[in-house]
Image (spheres, rainbow, N blue to C red):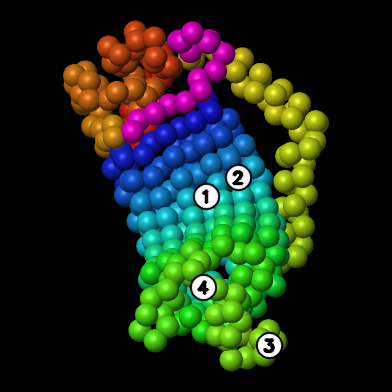
Amino acid sequence: MYRLLLKSNFIIKIYDHAFDSIADSLIELDLQMNQISNISSKWFNSKFHRLQILNLALNQLETFDDFDHIHLPALRELNLSGNQIEFFPKQIHQWISLTKLDLSFNKLSSIPRFALFGLQNLKWLSLASNRNLTCIVQDSFKHLRLLNYLDLSSTNLFTVDGCIFLQLISLKILKIERVTMNCSSCWLPIARKNSIQSIGQCLDNSTIHNLSSLTDQQLDSSCSKSSIDCSTDSCEPGSFNIDSKSLSSMRQLSTLAKNSNASKNLYRWKQVVRRNRHQHQKQIINNNPTIIESVVTHGANMDVSPSYELSSNNKRKLYNPMFTDTPSNDMNSPQSSTIFLNENRFQKNQLLSENL
């Protein structure tokens, strides 16, 4: 199985080891638009070593305290938007293959120093609509050499520390819409000099100007300072202590996962053994009998009682074998991809239905 899409299912809790049987083959896991308030390492762990896309948007997450030492060497996209996160999740720095990180619509008040340290591959970052966000300094973005898109819109920043551009040498687009700032802010000419497209507005004598409409002459004459002092920070965001040894270990794991033929061959061998071991337990039914590409349960409402009637499956557009043992009539459709489990798996399927 490559993709598991469980969005809009009113999932409140995911029980321990719920994904153990498929975690090592998943590339995408979509849990957005549910009611999940806690992510436990007992079900979300290093077994997801092939996972590239994780979507946890629009849930009720507050912290990530249980994520220490969870290595996800292949994770490229992480969406945590629309949650209740107040403190920057420091565990994110472990996932050094990230290229896209969405933390918009949360409750962050600052981005600590070294919060994103180690994410050398990050190219896209959104912190938009964190209404309490008041403090960002240059070390908040330390070593983000490849970042080319940054969204700080709808935050409570009064200005941008011009020193951050010393770190963001690849930045091309800076969105800072619906943020109250003066057109005399000294970061504006620095951004223009670095060929950064600034999208937003500023205030000059009660007149609102689009940042893109400001002329070079206006920008050059706006800042009253001849130079910007980057030896001190304009605010205090706090900081993270990063263990260099653990960071080095994570880089080695990522390199092995990407480049080692031995690792790839070992993974394929494990897959063959696992498939042979469970061949008597399940049978894949579709046009391609070797693998299921995805399972989708968008809007299926997975809070299903074990005593449900067969007719309840009619509510599901696609049948998900993880949560019931009786396929719907849609299984005969040529577009359906399902797993048929024999009777000795009946109890386990009902348990998974209750867990999720």
The foreground one among 102 and 340 is: 102
Distance, label 3 to label 2, CA atoms, is: 40 Å
Task: Inspect the image, locate mark 3, and give the three-letter code of the amino acid beneath it.
Answer: Ser
Find out whether the residues at labels 3 and 4 contact each other: C-beta distance under 8 Å. Answer: no
**Magenta span includes 289:** yes
Residue, disc 3: 227
Q: Which of the marked residues, 4 or 2, is nearer the chain's N terminus?
A: 2
Q: Which of the marked residues, 3 or 4, is nearer the chain's N terminus?
A: 4
Nearer the viewer's eye, disc 3 or disc 4? 4
Horizontally, residue 275 falls left or right of residue 10, namely: right
Q: Tag 3: Cα neighbours inside 10 Å, few (<14), some, or many (≥20)?
A: few
Q: Secondary structure at mark 4?
A: loop
Find out whether the residues at labels 1 and 2 contact each other: C-beta distance under 8 Å. Answer: yes
Q: Secondary structure at mark 3?
A: loop
Count of all numbered marks drawn on residues in the image: 4
* Rendering coords of residue 91 (x, y %): 58, 60
Q: Which of the marked residues, 3 or 2, is nearer the chain's N terminus?
A: 2
Q: Which of the marked residues, 1 or 4, is nearer the chain's N terminus?
A: 1
* Rendering coords of residue 48 (x, y %): 58, 40
Residue, disc 2: 75
Distance, label 4 to label 2, CA atoms, is: 39 Å
For image coordinates 41% across by 20% down, the residue present is 345
Q: Which mark is residue 214?
A: 4
Nearer the viewer's eye, disc 1 or disc 3? 3
Residue 46 in view here: no
